[in-house]
Image: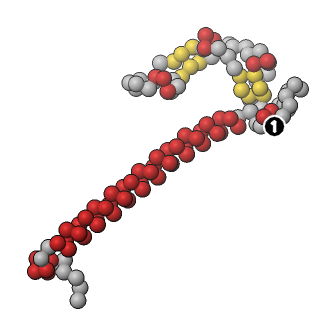
Amino acid sequence: MVTAGTAVYGLTELGGLDVWQVMGLRETGSHAYDVTELIVPAVRSIRLGDPPQSHAEGALYLLPHDSPWAGGFATIALGIASSMHEALVAAAREKHEAEAAVVRLVQTLPASLRTVCGLAPAQ
């Protein structure tokens, strides 16, 4: 009988597939594997919807079995968002500083040159 769930098995029980042809990313876990005729003992598997095991007590065992994964994925997304926010703030500061420098430079020009260039204050 096939049921949906999570199983734990050793690397020696896997057959690797060479489908990732990108240099330098092998250790990211971005590779594929296959399993043929593998029987996983019940003690090394969790079926979806199973109640907590009889020895399990406390809040940790009341979490759905896939909850720890969600935290890991959210951490990655939050890290990317934080980096993007920092880059946006830095770019805005640089732009503001550059605009302020241009304004200071224009103010040092003689009034006649500012008028010719169309930079004279409106009257």
Instruction: Kindly give the residue lying farthest to the bottom in the view shown.
Output: 123
Question: Which residue sits at x=78%, y=34%?
Answer: 60
At mark 1, the secondary structure is helix
Residue 67, percent from left and from top: 70, 37
Near-viewer residue (96 or 42): 96
Near-viewer residue (8 or 58): 58
Q: In the image, is residue 37 above or below residue 88?
A: above
Going by the image, does 92 lie left or right of 34? left
- On the image, which quarter does residue 72 sit in? top right
Visible residue check, residue 49: no
Q: Please give the residue where the numbered disc 1 appears in the rendered image.
A: 59
Residue 34, percent from left and from top: 59, 18
Question: Which residue sits at x=42%, y=56%?
Answer: 89
Visible residue check, residue 104: yes
Within 10 Å of disc 1 (Cα), the crowding (few <14, some 14-19, many 20+) is: few
Figure quadrant of the C terminus: bottom left
Going by the image, does 45 lie left or right of 73? right
Residue 114, percent from left and from top: 15, 77
Figure quadrant of the N terminus: top right
- On the image, which quarter does residue 46 sit in? top right
Instruction: Kindly give the residue lying farthest to the top in the view shown.
Output: 12
Question: Which residue sits at x=61%, y=10%?
Answer: 12
Three-letter code, disc 1: Ala
Residue 20, percent from left and from top: 45, 24
Going by the image, does 33 lie left or right of 24? right
